[in-house]
Amino acid sequence: MMSSDPFLRRHPDRREFLTIGMGVFVALSLPLALRRHVTLVKRTFPIMGTIAEVQIAHKDVAYAESAIDAAIAELQWVERTMTRFRSDSDIGRANTGAARDGVRVTSETAIVITAALHAASVSDGRFDPAVGTASELWDVLNRHEPPAGDRVQRLAARGFWRKVDIAIREGAPQLRFDDPDLHLDLGAIAKGYGVDRATDVLRARGVQHAIVTVGGDLFALGQSPDGDPWTVGIRSPHDRHELAATLLVTDRAVATSGDYERFFRWHGMRFHHLIDPATAAPRRTPFHSATVLASRCIDADAASTAVFGLPRDEALAIAQRIDTSADVIPLM
């Protein structure tokens, strides 16, 4: 099912693209009006368990390289602070101690958790940043068969997000959990937040034309001087060498959640990393991905996870509760 909006092209011409990216998105075309005046400076690097790329169109290569350094530093800071895979991160410390005592976190982590809880509320819990224990149980990158059914069932439909309390106490944000089975996992929103921070750094440095991509999350900054938008290709869920669609975007975030990047197979079934809070298991659906366009990447990121598995009309209703300007492209 495809959107009929004018920014969506159904039949992409791969000759439009300068390079092929390594993640969900194909790298982006440089608008024709810019090619005569600037260089496309880009850098690809691993971060947040995926591949990131920053591309800047600028006439001064050294300046662009410095701006890329600053964008990468922002992404690295978000990873160190909000990953669940480090015991000394805000989330690592909270998952260890917030069910016993209040755990202080940075104001930035508080912002992301607050946004995550809002997305959980308006999606009726389809997005739940507190299903980290289920994510740990399934561990799809290392498992070869599903965990025991009783272990999964005890985590199902628990509404963990309702048991997360973030508030200012003694002058600083403090996080408390009201359930010992609750673990936070900000993997479906912190990447989007990191993309927004990296983009803000580029803006602050006067960069007008750039792309920041982290896995399935992207922000297209600016447009060409004659008004041409950037072109973003979404990989096909069925063949990573093909494009399912291309989007024309300007100052817009794009996020895709899909079942084809992180998964294992067992008895012919694919078990992916997108956990359904209602079942505490990978969401079963005929749809293989959902792409959301929004004003901010933090919102597109959360919304794409929330609406994954839904037909477009239902998905759009939820996404627009998170960002009223959102649009959705589900792919089967």
Image (cartoon, grey):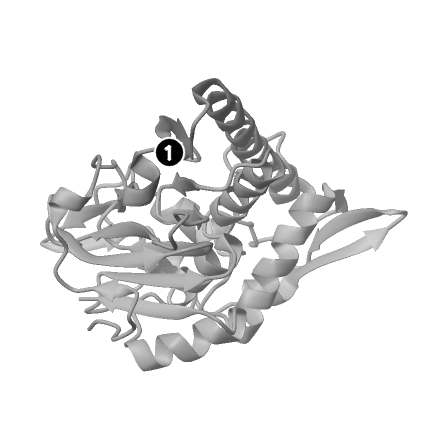
The answer, for residue 187, to whether it is visible in the render is: yes
Helix, strand or loop at label 1? It is strand
Work out whether 292 lies above or below 38: below
**Residue 209 left/right relative to 3:** right
Check disc 1 and give the amino acid type. Answer: Glu
Q: In which quarter of the image is residue 144?
A: top left
Residue at point 38% right, 52% down?
A: 226
Q: Is residue 219 above or below residue 141?
A: below
* Closest to the observer, 196 or 136: 196
Q: Which quarter of the image is occupied by the N terminus?
A: bottom left
Q: In which quarter of the image is the C terminus?
A: bottom left
Crowding at dot 1, Cα within 10 Å, few <14 / some 14-19 / many 20+, comes out as many
Task: Estimate the x, y position of residue 213 in percent, counting from the top left.
Answer: 39, 41
What residue do we see at 42% from left, 45% from top?
136
Q: Position of residue 193 (x, y in %)?
A: 54, 47
Say whether residue 322 is left or right of residue 11: right
Q: Nearer the viewer, residue 274 or 135?
A: 274
Which residue is more in the foreground, 166 or 107?
A: 107
Image quadrant of residue 319? bottom left
- Of 79 and 20, nearer the camera is 20
Q: Quadrant of residue 252?
A: bottom left
Q: In the figure, 113 relative to 91: above or below? A: below
In percent of width and height, residue 246 lies at 23, 56
Question: In the rendered view, does 256 fall on the left or right side of 1?
Answer: right
Tell me residue 154's x, y (percent).
44, 62
Find disc 1 in the rendering and name its residue.
53
Farthest residue in the right direction?
170
The residue depicted at 62 percent of the width and 33 percent of the height is 89
